[in-house]
Amino acid sequence: MTDDQLEAALRQLRVDVPEPPNVEAQVRARLSEPRRRRPVLVTAAAVLLAFALAFAVSPDVRAAVSEFLRFAGIEFSRQPPPPIPETPTVPGERKTTLDEARRRFDVKVPQALGQPAEVRVTERVVSLLYPGKRLDQFEGDFRPTMAKFAHAQDIERVRVNGHEGLWIPRPHEVMYIDPNGVWQDESARMSGKTLIWLENGITMRLEGDFTKDEAIRIASS
């Protein structure tokens, strides 16, 4: 991936990319502030300038930033995925009923899909399973819950019910991350096309063999 492609991908996912020339102007402006505010402003500006310069010249810093892109509790990795086990298992996952799942989660059921054929839960995720489709729901806070292995150029920014979302138009590997932040290799599996959006603090992840428009229509229901 070229520097221009990386920068475009980061901007698409709302990751701010520092621009050294603008930072330099900001530093000079801060230095002209009254003396009583200068120490804090100079420190902050110096840190920002140092990071901007490092990003501009250091492959290691660029690699660290591009290594993980996060959206709504899902981390996107450019590293090679782990081997997929013959029978992927998610630690602590079990089958349950929709009524029981609703006692623990604020479960949303799309009208376009109706009642799920199967419901599964873990400590953090409720999954509604349909023939050829799957809808995962979990709190999209700062603790990552899932990891996806996808190229930045394969991720498209979309809108779902007025909320920001991501569309991944081809199969890719996905893995569960436990509450301690540990990547569970035994849960690695191939995912279908996926629509991800954040609604009222809840991450909705719709997976299946459909077009982008079909996925957005289901999500909007």
Image (tube, helix red, strand yellow):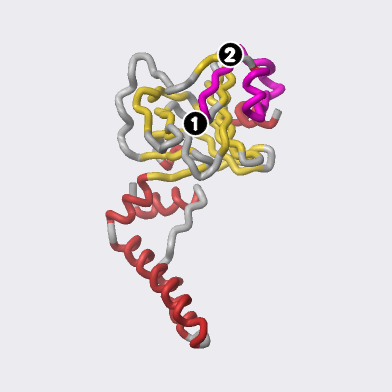
Q: Nearer the viewer, residue 205 or 139?
A: 139
Residue 93 image point, x, y percent: 48, 20
**Dot label at residue 179:** none
Rendered residue at 42%/34% (across/down): 148
The mark total stands at 2
**Badge 2 amino acid:** Glu
Which span is picked out in magenta?
Answer: 99-123
**Dot label at residue 118:** 2
Is residue 25 something that shows in the picture? no
Residue 9 image point, x, y percent: 44, 48
**Badge 1 amino acid:** Pro
Rendered residue at 59%/32% (across/down): 204
Tell me which label, 1 or 2, sits earlier in the chain.
Answer: 2
In which quarter of the view is residue 20 placed? Answer: bottom left
Q: Which residue is mark 1?
A: 169
Q: What secondary structure is the magenta-colored segment mainly?
A: loop
Q: Secondary structure at mark 2?
A: strand
Rendered residue at 62%/41% (across/down): 201
11 relative position to 101: left or right:
left
How many angstroms separate mark 1 from mark 2 (CA)? 25 Å
Contact between labelled residues 2 and 1, with CB atoms less than 8 Å apart: no
